[in-house]
Image (cartoon, rainbow, N blue to C red):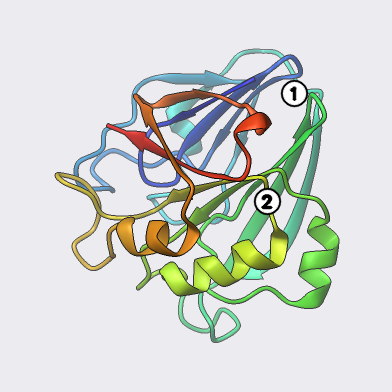
Amino acid sequence: MTLTWYGHSCFLLESGDGSVVFDPYAPGSVPGWTLPALRADCVICSHGHRDHGWRDGVAPTGGAFSGRIEQVASFHDDKRGALRGENTITLVETEGVRLAHMGDIGCALTAEQIAALGRVDVLMIPVGGHYTVDAAGAWEITKALSPKIVIPMHYRGKGFGYDVIGPVEPFLALAGNVKTIDGMRWTVDLSDAPATVVFRR
């Protein structure tokens, strides 16, 4: 099973059950990133904003993803959606591994949401703040879910990301156990746990 990061919050998951793209972004919507032509069995968008909801950017394979998919409703802000609307958390279970993509979550998790998500092996979570939870908020969610692997996303780096969001380093300082991947593709390996996986562009 592999995860490929295409920048921002977009990942391609490939496993024996098929392929899933999370949160593809529209052309010109994310500074410094250009989405290549992608194909997948399933496309999941956490919400409809252009930098997360460009379904047209992913061509269907004609196949079907046979893993398990569950979704949990949440909010894009800490005002119950009054500022930026709703956000969907997606949990995918494939090859015995449970991966949670948090989308643009902007609030703490409730006890009910934590219970609904259950065991999380790999957590993809925004850390840049402003539009989402910041490093501290992301760390609180991470502690609540206790994943084996955490992958920060939706942050600003050298030559990419929105100016108003923060870099990844504050979250790395909290999470520790950083494993840097030389490239954008990672073979999912839970034996690295506990680890914070960061892709080197």
Q: Nearer the viewer, mark 1 or mark 2?
A: 2
Residue 145 lies left or right of residue 186; in this view the side is: right
User: Which residue position holds label 1?
Assistant: 65
Q: Quadrant of residue 171?
A: bottom left
Q: Nearer the viewer, residue 73 or 194?
A: 194
Lower position in the chain sequence, tag 1 or tag 2: 1
Is residue 76 in view? no
What is the x, y in percent for residue 18?
70, 18
Kind of residue at badge 2: Pro
**Mark 2 residue element:** loop
Query: Which quadrant of the figure contains the N terminus?
Result: top right
What is the x, y in percent for residue 137?
51, 73
User: Which residue position holds label 2?
Assistant: 147
Crowding around mark 1 (Cα neighbors within 10 Å: few <14, some 14 to 19, many 20+) is: some
Residue depicted at 28% across the width and 58% down the height: 167
- How many labels, in total? 2
Residue depicted at 54% across the width and 55% down the height: 103
